[in-house]
Image (cartoon, grey):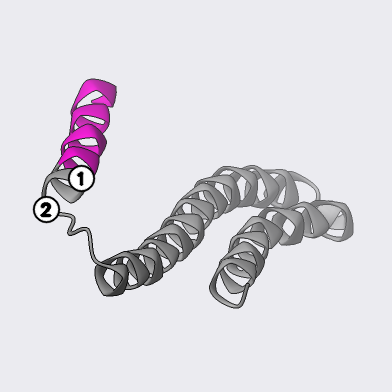
Amino acid sequence: MKKKILSFITLLGASAALFAEDTAAAAASSAGAMKYLAASIAVGLACIAGGMAVGKIGAAAMGAMSENPELSGKALPFVGLAEGICLWGMLVAVLILFR
């Protein structure tokens, strides 16, 4: 799986280099496109990682609360911390786009 992802990223970079034009307008539009691509990767990876973290932490928290309901106050803040990963990805995307 990692080899497929790495080869896709390499192919994407190589095709961008092959079809790039030497004019200043093309360079400016390419830089703008790269900003959007970088922002989307930042948000996408952060949300995937946040979803995986919330899934694991949420399942463990619900299991613990089913055995002892008093643990809800101690377990739910960890789910909120895992959701914060998505917010950091969004913040990075905003910083990339409005730089």
Furthest-top residue in this view: 3
Name the residue beneath numbered marker 2: 19
Measuring from the top left, give residue 47's x and y in whole percent: 50, 58
Q: Relative to 11, is 21 above or below? A: below
**Is residue 8 magenta-colored?**
yes
Q: Is residue 15 left or right of residue 13?
A: left
Measuring from the top left, give residue 70's x and y in whole percent: 88, 56
Q: Amino acid type of disc 2?
A: Phe
Residue plotted at (24% across, 66% down): 23
Magenta range is 1-14
**Is residue 2 magenta-colored?**
yes
Measuring from the top left, give residue 65's x and y in whole percent: 74, 51
Furthest-front residue in this view: 23
Name the residue beneath numbered marker 1: 17
Frontmost residue, 53 versus 93: 93
Q: Is residue 40 left or right of residue 8?
A: right
Q: Is label 1 in contact with label 2 (beta carbons under 8 Å)?
A: yes
Q: Amino acid type of disc 1?
A: Ala
Residue plotted at (65% across, 52% down): 62
Frontmost residue, 3 versus 30: 30
Q: Relative to 50, is 64 above or below? A: above
Marks 1 and 2 sit apart, C-alpha to C-alpha, by 6 Å
Q: Secondary structure at mark 2?
A: loop
